[in-house]
Image (tube, grey):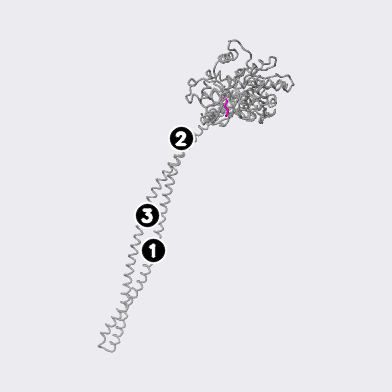
Amino acid sequence: MKNNALTEETIFIIEEKCQGCNKCIRNCPVFGANVSYTINGATKVKVNPELCIHCGKCIEVCDHYARDYRDDTERFFHALQEGAAISVLVAPSVRTNFPEYKRVIGFLKKAGAHLVYDVSFGADITVWAYLKVLAATGVSSIIAQPCPVIVNYVEKHQPALVDYLAPVQSPMMCTAIYLRKYTGCRDKLAFLSPCIGKNDEIRDANTEKMVEYNVTFKKLLDYMAKNGIKLQEYPEREFDDPGCGLGYVFPRPGGLRQNVEAVVGDVWIRQVEGQEEAYRYLQEYSRRLERGKKLPTLVDILNCPYGCNKGTGTYPGGDLDDIDLAMQAFSQEKLVNKRGQRGKNPSAKLFRFFDKKLKLDDFSRRYKKVDVRPLKEPTREEYAAIFLKLHKDTPEAQNLNCSACGYQSCRDMARAIFNQLDRPEDCMDYNRKEVILENKKLEEKNLEIQRMLAEITALSEERQERAAELTRRIHEITVAMEEVYRQNEQAAQAIERIGDDVREVAEYAETLRKLIAEINDNVDRFTEATADILGVARQTKILSLNAGIEAARSGEHGKGFNVLAQEIKRLAEKSQITAEEALGNEEAIQDLVSKVYEISNTVDQKMAAVNAAIMNIADIIQEFTSQGEEMVATATQIVHDYAQNQV
């Protein structure tokens, strides 16, 4: 069985089973002994061990089986199996919880228990000691304490009453003391018990920890079922104690009263049972004490409404009449003698034995005031602030007292919240008003949404108009851009043709340069020939001059030759003039060729620049075309997205 709470506490929460129904809070006799909390959004209620008195009411009322307790059953049987020397004290209520209780004794003996004592015997010692205290000390009032839960409550929550608790050990402890001090038994002691709260008593320093194990009836039955143990398979055995008087009636309500009245008839005894009455009565007792009012001589008070026969450590169920029948049968067995006649009070003989053998001081009990941090009481202003947080702003709301939160009044709930024991979310009225406020907020939100929807509708119509206008304009942009593409394409084609023409002109210029170079070569050869002709003409002129001189010398015979010499001279001069003119024209030609060559180079450079510019323009047009395509795509996407948003 999984436990997510503090694993060492006697009573604990099984967290996964807890439904946060607050039933444990509502039925708990101690304010603050339960703490509401949330885990993963779910409300849970855990035990506050500092304030809990182990009354077991939360286990009894939990419909979800989310509370359980621990005792020493497993540890007890493990010790027996290990060979530990253990004797067992058995509560008188064994008779009503185990019809074959004598077989229980046989089972315990078989398991290794040494002695098995009936605590009814210890109950007789307790009654004897009470009467001794009342007679010897003259105390005006004592609160009986067979019930450890009552002791827990007084020590923790009514410390002013500690001095009024009976200064006598419980029947369990009186039995243990008798075994230790009067029989010399040194065994470890276990108590077969109907009570969860006995855990606290056996661990209390004021009981000297004589008892080590609290084995409850319920956990014993669980152990037997788990291990396949059947009582009918074990022999009946008798208790090892000397025998009891009226102590066996202690488990029933008023059992102590019955014992005392059997000996002392005229005494004021207040009998109180059950969580609903016992703790309310102790508060009343405290108020009477403060006012100096007369108190009962003996308060016979038990936590469980039906006494120990249906204690917190027993299985629920069983008719009260069946319990009474079992008690009555044992009573007849004790009170009727062998002749079938009703005998005297069986406790009288025991009391005489106790007077001779027992010392009252051996069975005395002390108590302690447990240092419990008191819960804080909010001031008037603090209460007002908590009520305001709970939406309880009127006296009627502050006194609704529906107890759905588990507390008896709205004021108690506010106090619990102040002490961090609970949360506003556990208040049903708070949640109802929170729902109302949330509904109001939702209505306001709905109105706001309707207003916004109207605005959105108007905006939607306007937006649709804008969308249509945007679509129209973007369409115009698209058409214009497509026209630009077309023009760009034509420009690109024209530029390409210009580029081809430029390349063709460049080719012509190159051809021209080659022709000019060839002309230049021919001019150079012509210049050389002209120079040769000029040289021949000059030489011829010299020769004709020489021939004239020789002809003059020759006289008459040289006239003809002189004529020839003159003609040669004329031809030489004419050739010289022609050659000189040719040389002059050659220089002019060379000047023109140089100019043509320079112009050709210039054309070539200009055409290269034009070609580069054309290529640059082509790149720009290509880039512009790409950007235009992106613009058209973006514009188209805008229209598409806008249309989608409208849908």
What is the quadrant of residue 72 in the picture?
A: top right
Q: CA distance from mark 2 to mark 3?
A: 48 Å
Report the residue marked by disc 3.
Answer: 499
Q: CA distance from mark 2 to mark 1?
A: 64 Å
Label 1, secondary structure: give it.
helix
Do we see residue 312 in this rendering?
A: no
- Does label 2 or label 3 sit earlier along the sequence? 3
Kindly identify the amino acid type of the residue bearing the numbered disc 1. Asn
Label 3, secondary structure: give it.
helix
Q: Is residue 189 magenta?
A: yes
Q: Mark 1: few, some, or many residues within 10 Å (few <14, many ≥20)?
A: some
Q: Is residue 102 magenta?
A: no
Label total for image: 3
Image coordinates of residue 376 in percent, x first then y, are: 67, 30
Which of the pair 347/457 is nearer the observer?
A: 347
* 2 vs 622: above or below: above
Image coordinates of residue 22 in percent, x first then y, are: 58, 24
Label 2, secondary structure: give it.
helix
- Which label lies toward us, 2 or 1? 2
Report the residue marked by disc 1.
Answer: 601
Q: CA distance from mark 1 to mark 3?
A: 19 Å
Kindly identify the amino acid type of the residue bearing the numbered disc 3. Gly
Task: Identify the residue at horizontal 38%, vertical 66% (top origin).
Answer: 595
Task: Find residue 637 and name its label.
Answer: none
Task: Identify the residue at horizontal 46%, vertical 38% (top origin).
Answer: 639
Residue range highlighted in magenta? 187-191
